[in-house]
Image (tube, rainbow, N blue to C red):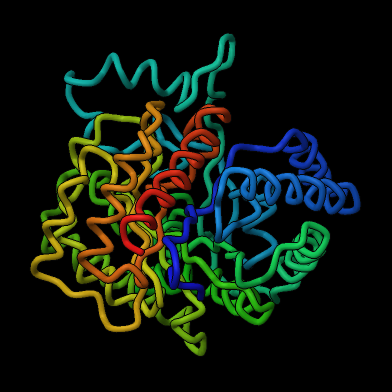
Amino acid sequence: MKRSTDRILTTHPGRLPDPPVRDEAQAARSKGDQATLDRLMRQGAIEMFRMQREHGVDIMSDGEFWKGRDNIYYSSRATGIETRPVKGDEWPSTLGTQRERIGPQFSDFYSAYDRLGNTPRPGVTVPPFSEKYVMAGEVKALPADPIKHDIEVIKGAMQEAGVDTEDYFYPVLGPGWLDHFVWNEYYKTEEEYVYALADIVKNDSKAVVDAGFVLQIDDPGLCDRYGMIDPDPGYEEYRRQENIRIEATNWALQGIPEDRVRYHTCWGSWHTPHTTDIPFAQVIDLMLKVNAGAYSIEAADVQHELDYKVWQNHKLADGKIFIPGVIAHKTTTIEPPELVAERIVMWANMFGKQNVIAGVDCGVGGRCYPEVGWAKLQALSDGAALASKQLW
């Protein structure tokens, strides 16, 4: 895993503004047209690498425009997961159980938000949910052939674009994120359910590292799930539940060297009030239990910009890398490079400049309008350049 040895490096959590081929790629994916999908994946990934270079991103990903959390994904990873129609006022994900929705305080806001989403467009509304994914039987992981195929396609794009593996990371959904979308209707205990989720991603994780990539475990759930449980479970009970998920994550990472893993968590990508966010102080020790060489976390959003104070009572272990968000994804305001540099310098002074890589709170794709997302990444690299002049 690269370090900021002579300047502050930049990266992001994975999701980028979609390339022009995104809709065509998703259509080919849904039709099972693998040859067309492979061609569009390669074409779109090359475009994503070009755009990242132009905007000064050092440690890149492919933008994830061709992926999906749907039946194609689940059925190719494991048995035991089925779709069923939603019943009554059910939601297909835990987003529908946010405590913030309860009561009249934000009812008008959510009425509009549920129709329009994060990036409203004229005449475009979010379609109604009709199905949800459930564990209806024993979950058994399938061979990692699908992700191995995807990896080979992306490797071809990297080779054509001249991207080295040390400048690339591959995100994989963690068990603590999958539980937002796959509901338990089979297992009797929470532990059985969570480890079944971990089994879904274990083969993918190994395949990524075997391919020579840095693996990123995507786990916003460590922080965001707290606000989706009604009634409020309290911190002690929530920490008990999340500890199970962290232990299952480490189980899925068995045999993978820590220095090949980066772990990402945040308080979600939705542009909502976030009044029920759990304090970082309640989960920081759980985050640091993950067997990873780097930790990427939201730190620029106004709800969490003061979280740096939590580090006064905690330590980043020797040899670890910290990837703080110095760009927010929940606002269309473009951060001034001077502010980005100030944030980076603060973290560098806290952890050592060689141990800090400048990041983004969460992916900008689908969370910002495309031109805004790219402008934010430019501000990230411009701020990192200013910070590097101060630090070196």
Residue occupying image coordinates x 41% and y 66%: 263
Q: Observer-nearest residue: 264 or 70?
A: 264
Residue furthest out toward the bottom: 255
Residue occupying image coordinates x 9% and y 66%: 312
Residue occupying image coordinates x 38% and y 39%: 337
Does residue 316 sit above or below 73 in this rendering? below
Residue 185 in view in this figure: no
Does residue 221 sit above or below 93 in this rendering? below
Question: Quarter of the image holding residue 258?
Answer: bottom left
**Residue 245, percent from left and from top:** 34, 69
Is residue 129 found left or right of 45 in the rendered image? left
Residue occupying image coordinates x 60% and y 54%: 82
Residue furthest out toward the right: 35
Which image quarter is the C terminus in?
Answer: bottom left
Is residue 101 found left or right of 176 in the rendered image? left
Number of disc labels: 0
**Residue 42, percent from left and from top:** 81, 52
Residue 168 in view in this figure: yes
Residue furthest out toward the top: 123
**Residue 159, percent from left and from top:** 80, 65
**Residue 363, percent from left and from top:** 48, 45
Is residue 39 found left or right of 2 in the rendered image? right
Question: Quarter of the image holding residue 106?
Answer: top left
Q: Observer-nearest residue: 352 or 60?
A: 352
Q: Observer-nearest residue: 134 or 240?
A: 240
